[in-house]
Image: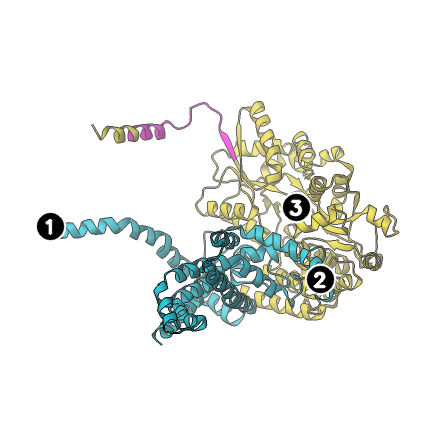
Chain colours: A cyan, B yellow
Amino acid sequence: MRFKATLENYVFVLPAVLIFLIFYVIPFIWVFQLGLFDWDGILPTKTFVGLDNFKEIFFQDKIWWQSMLNAGWITFIALTLQNAVAFLLAMACNREIKLKHFYRLIFFIPPVLSEVVVGLVWQWILDGNYGLLNGWLVQLGLPNLVRNWLSDPNTALTTVAIVHSWKGFGWGFLIFLAGLQTIPREFYEAARVDGANAWDSFRKITIPLMVPVAVLVAILTVLGTMQAFVLITAMTGGGPAYHTQVPVLRILASMRGSSRFGYACAQGINFGLILMAISFIQYRFSRKARNT
Amino acid sequence: MRKFPVFYILFLLIFAGCSGANKGSKPSVTVWHWMTDRDPAFQELAKKYETDTGIKINFELYAPSDAYSQKVRAAAQGQNLPDIYGILGEKRDFSSFVKAGHVLELTPYMEESGAAWKNALFAKALAINEFREGNSYGVKPGIYGVPIDTMTIQMLYNKDLFRQLGLDPDSPPKTFQEFLDIGKKIKQANLQGLVSGWDETWIIDSLASNYAFNIMGEGKVMATIRGEVPYTDPDWIRVLAIFKEMQDSGVLANGLVTMINKTAEQLFANGRAVFAFNGSWCVNVYKGMNPDLNYGAMIPPSAGDKYPMTIWGGAGSSFMVNLRSKNMEEAVKFLRWLTDKDQQVYLAQSTNNLPANKESLSKLSPLLSQFAYVMEHTTHPSAWGISEFPQVIEAIDKGIQSIIIGEKSPEQVAQEVQRMKERESARKR
């Protein structure tokens, strides 16, 4: 009877387990296996190359690591600028202000827009010849600042990073706002009774209680930003030269440009492991921060 | 009783599955393509073909081309390719499809009746679909695809802006120095010079290849690809220096290195840029954007005196027949009909693309004819029989972007390209 009950339980979870196996575990094993082969994605035969693809990534492919650094810079901007803006706006909307529901809606519009459309619109705004931004700079009496924002190697990556932050801050805003709304009002009232000012309340109540939320937002920001590529493709195509290349664009270049599916899989594994390591470090750091 | 509906559905499904196609009915042919602009014309032609022969042609559009390409590769893996399809990518990819047994060899059909079909098509367009004796891909020599249209990539110039700059609109620059001199005038007039989609590396590759043929000749270019001449050779440095000279003279538009072709097309169509570098498909695009645009086509001005300027061309869109198709014969017959003069004229007139059939040329618009009549000056990597490593091509194209933005010198780029060539050659060994 007990065996039957256990079997029944397993039958109930079987669909979920099967879906997990078919769509997550097997593809992951397959990708890892392909990373050990030289394969063009068309021929039925694959050549086993062992760890050669991984060796090439680590010791020869400088552009791969440059793309990783570029993604790191975009992520740094997102972690600081994007999340700071998201947090400040969430703080503002958490207060009793007029039209706060309207602002919530407005702030969430950029994330739901198509990345290609956003990229093309910003490309138009930032165009070096007929762009709106340069036009405004001239009107404001700042012609010295006029430049080709996306073609100048000194500004291309940071410009892309800022547009990416504009596009993505709405997610952080929503999560921060949800986190702020879970902090009981009584905490602030009790603090005020004890003589705490606004800064004290922020430092001693809001920040400690928001640490888990900030960690979640930071992990999601890192994972989302490191994998960004659609917006970058639409804005610069990874150029000028390799100045806005990011890892996903390099994986696509290996797969589609060079028809090296095995190498692309090895790059994907390398990238996935790096992202997992970063997330793990962030998690450990947050646990430590929470305990202290 | 409750089991009845399930049983009934199963019964219907089983018998529906067993029924199959009606015996005696004509087969239908399925074609997968990616050409959004040509789809209405294809559908019209399919209707006409069904009326004439009773055979239904299903044109299925999968766009954009990236998604189409992935679909075809996935279908090849699962052996689910349709009767007719196109292969996007380089000749190396095409050869893999042939070697994997996905493409029917069409040489016997092309050679029938005194090679009538073969002779009706542009030899350059056919060469793209052909693997010659001793090709480096290891493919059995033969013709494996049918060109349905063709193209050439040239420079365009705005005649009205030429007048504004005090230039003769009927006499575009013929030498590289004349071209550079116009750059100075463009700068003074505060106009944009050459626009093109140079954020896509293949367009840069096309112009670089034009000048490589012009400066060192085809033999030396091929020798470089075979690894017999290094990219640090003075002729290659000269090819790279061409781009620096263009940038320094002001003949290139600002922001060219991250410009997408659509933006380039808009700038040229709206009369903001004096020159464009674009394929013959642009005739249709410009017509849609600005029907009154007054422009002409020209071969890029020559920078060398030993060899003629050779432009990219011939490679348009091609269709292949699936070797595993049950409707192989019908598929071949349809492709033959599609490349006949009347259908080619219809396609050319309705889509403004260059036809693959030579006999259709007389019916073209004067502007499109300017692209068609330079076919003898064309070449294309897919017709070379050997191909450069994609990583080397990328290093050249990205290097040219670095030269244009003033980050690297032609010599530095040449060294980097050569290092990449040596790395890839070693990996291949």
Between circles 2 and 3, the one closer to the viewer is 2
Q: Which mark is residue B315?
A: 3
**Mark 1 and mark 2, same subunit?**
yes
**Mark 2 and mark 3, same subunit?**
no
The reply to whether residue A267 is visible in this rendering is no
Amino acid type, mark 3: Ala
**Mark 1 and mark 3, same subunit?**
no
Give me the C-alpha separation between circle 1 and circle 3. Answer: 72 Å
Q: Which residues are magenta?
A: B10-30
x then y, percent, for residue A141? 73, 64
Q: In the visual, does B371 lie left or right of A242? A: right
Chain containing the residue with disc 3: B
Chain containing the residue with disc 2: A
Between circles 1 and 3, the one closer to the viewer is 1
The answer to whether residue B21 is magenta is yes
Q: Which mark is residue A1?
A: 1
Front in this rendered view, residue B228 or B206: B206
Chain containing the residue with disc 1: A
Q: Who comes first in sequence, dot 1 or dot 2?
A: 1
Q: Which mark is residue B232?
A: none
Q: Which mark is residue A140?
A: 2
Q: In the visual, does B146 lie left or right of A36? A: right
The answer to whether residue B41 is magenta is no
- On the image, which quarter does residue B114 sit in? top right
Q: Quadrant of the C terminus of chain A?
A: bottom left
Secondary structure at badge 3 equals: loop
Give me the C-alpha separation between circle 1 and circle 2. Answer: 82 Å
Front in this rendered view, residue B58 or B249: B249
Q: In the visual, does B362 lie left or right of A50? A: right
- On the image, which quarter does residue B391 sit in? bottom right
